[in-house]
Image: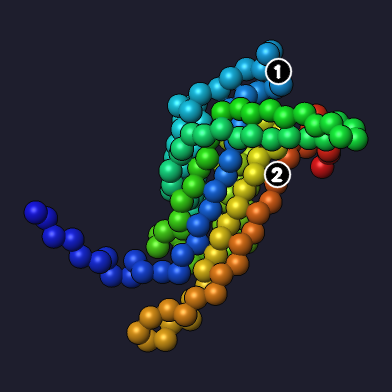
Amino acid sequence: MKKFKKVEGSKIPLRKYAITCGLQEGYGPTGVLHTLEQGIQVVEAWMKERAAAGLPFLTGTVSSGTVIYAWPEGEGKAGSGNEPCVTFSGEVSMYVDNLSNQEIEEILDDLGTNLGSAMGQTRLYLSLHTYEGINTGRDYILSSKSFAWVIQAEETQTPTGEEV
């Protein structure tokens, strides 16, 4: 069996992130259904573009799921729906640990914009969970903060009329 050792300098305070993007472009039976593979291709192309330009990027995992939602339709009534989705998630690695939380949010917004545009989405849902550490010499004392936000394509409106 191979032995593994901890990589020097790789132990950093944890910062997790996620972007969730629906795969159905449009609504109802006329909507175009994109695939998980198309989502992976968009994320991979985004990473390669940033790497080639010398810009920081985030690596992570693309997983599939189903987003389920509902909306009010007047007193005592509601509509609902669901669609396949991709979620890109991961942890900020030691290679980009020097970036601020604001810079990580901007990188997530950039990837979300690319993914949402390619999948024909109006809105995407993003999150960042940060754990800031104080090095005591022996270990870290952590405090956590979590942020969630929505990005929406400009000049669009959700089915319930929300605009940016």
Kindly indicate the quadrant of the structure image that contains residue 79: top right
Q: In this view, does 27 lie above or below 162?
A: above
Kindly indicate the quadrant of the structure image that contains residue 80: top right
| Residue positioned 38% across, 81% down in the render | 139
How far apart in space, not on screen, are marks 2 and 1 (Cα)? 22 Å
Q: Residue 151 carries which label?
A: 2
Residue nearer the viewer, 52 or 20? 20
Q: Is residue 148 above or below residue 144?
A: above
Residue at the right extreme, as displayed: 75
x and y percentages locating residue 110 in the rendered image: 61, 45
Specify few, some or many for label 1: CA neighbours under 10 Å numbering under 14, 14-19, or 20 or more: few
Q: Which mark is residue 28?
A: 1
| Residue positioned 83% across, 38% down in the render | 163
Question: Is residue 97 left or right of 83 when viewed as pictured?
Answer: left
x and y percentages locating residue 69 in the rendered image: 69, 35
x and y percentages locating residue 123 in the rendered image: 70, 37
Mark 2 vs mark 1: in front: 1
